DNA sequence: GTCTATATTCTGATAGAC
DNA sequence: GTCTATCAGAATATAGAC
């Protein structure tokens, strides 16, 4: 539902109908609407974390950064609503529970650790990296949903970034 | 209203109350709720266009790019809801009217023309530029609203980008 | 665990008097 | 141009029978 109609189109009534239930029965499973968002938030982060953990990271910075960027932008491009829920603050009243937020922190730490392992350790560089990758993601979603206009720019972006932070050499 | 509570918090009733009107009287001014969004969309784009036109663009690429990036990221950081409305596809049912969309196209053309004037002419480079600048913007809004964590990275980002597209020389 | 029934409040929108 | 009155339906959520 959320994937098709956006994160704000979620209605407990429609969700219940989709699983052949009366809307009221959902309250057996979710304490509130935000609890549903919270579950989606947690699931999304778990999925991203799993992909990070499955990733075979090269020792060489450039191939490693390429793989990470492809992983993230693909994850983002797959599902606009999930991207909004996880990375944009688009539902003002929603805040993840501590348990769900902990998973998001884990994702962040994992990403950070991978980047550190290829030599990217400065806070500024990490922020610049996330800005670059999230920019490609959000532009892909907003301006070419379903296409690959910005996905095609990933390798070029990584080259630009690597040159900037690593200079001529490789670490 | 939208600025404070987000783009989805807009209700015609609350809007009417805010201007001391009965909700029904709004229909004298707006044919529908989407017409209100459309007005905001047009106003936002007009404002951005005006700022672009006011901008005194340097002949040198690097200072020019810095000024453009600062202009855009500042515009974005000022107002999360406006940014969502103009640049993210966060209201699924809303599509700007042809008249309003024309203003958005004008903004795009103006930005494109300014970048071309400092030597940035390839489509790919332009897309990479917008990804970088929108990445800084959306990260600033999502992770440090009201702060300057990503704004501080602008000059560094422009240096990285310029080096990549212009190489050693300046155009 | 699922249902019926219901509470409460909100939503966008229209008709027609003044 | 603004109002009153009203529609038709949406929303989240609770109480209590089975």
Image (spheres, coloured by chain):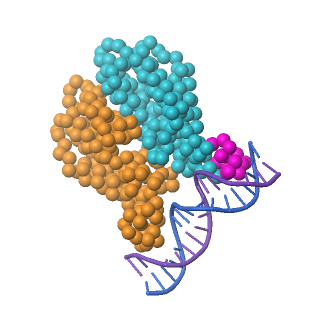
Chain colours: A orange, B cyan, C purple, D blue
Q: Give coordinates of residue B157: x percent, y percent.
A: 38, 28
At 61% from the left and 44% from the top, the residue drawn is: B31
Q: Give coordinates of residue A157: x percent, y percent.
A: 29, 30
Q: Quick check: is B18 in the magenta stretch?
A: yes
Q: Which one is nearer the viewer's eye here, A24 or B58?
A: A24
At 48% from the left and 47% from the top, the residue drawn is: B93
Q: Quadrant for the C terminus of chain B, please.
A: top left
At 45% from the left and 19% from the top, the residue drawn is: B114
Q: Which one is nearer the viewer's eye here, B32 or A163?
A: B32
- Left or right, B47 with reference to A52: right
- Left or right, D16 with reference to A128: right
Q: Quadrant of residue A59?
A: top left
The reply to whether residue B147 is in sight is no
Q: Quadrant of residue B66?
A: top left
Q: Quadrant of residue C15?
A: bottom right
Q: Please determine whether, in this image, residue A154 is positioned above or below residue D2.
A: above
At 38% from the left and 64% from the top, the residue drawn is: A18
Magenta stretch, residue numbers: B14-30
> How many numbered callouts?
0
Q: Quick check: is A20 in the magenta stretch?
A: no
- Left or right, B52 with reference to B62: right
Q: Please determine whether, in this image, residue B11 is positioned above or below residue A73.
A: below
Is the magenta region chiefly helix, strand or loop? helix
Q: Which one is nearer the viewer's eye here, A85 or A132?
A: A85
Q: Give coordinates of residue A145: x percent, y percent.
A: 35, 40
């Amino acid at each position: 539902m959320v994937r098709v109609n956006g994160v704000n189109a979620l209605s407990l009534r429609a969700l219940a109908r989709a699983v052949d239930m009366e809307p009221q029965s959902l309250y057996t499973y979710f304490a509130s609407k935000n609890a549903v968002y919270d579950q989606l938030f947690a699931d999304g982060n778990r999925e991203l974390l799993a992909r990070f953990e499955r990733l075979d990271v090269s020792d060489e910075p450039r191939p490693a950064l390429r793989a990470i960027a492809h992983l993230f932008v693909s994850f983002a491009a797959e599902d606009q609503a999930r991207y909004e829920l996880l990375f944009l603050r688009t539902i003002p009243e929603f805040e993840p529970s501590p348990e769900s937020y902990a998973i998001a922190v884990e994702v962040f730490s994992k990403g950070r650790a991978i980047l550190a392992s290829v030599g990217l350790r400065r806070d500024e560089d990490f922020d610049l990296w996330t800005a670059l990758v999230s920019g490609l993601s959000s532009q892909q979603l907003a301006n070419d949903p379903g296409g690959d206009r910005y996905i095609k720019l990933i390798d070029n972006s990584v080259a630009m970034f690597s040159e900037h932070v690593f200079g001529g050499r490789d670490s």
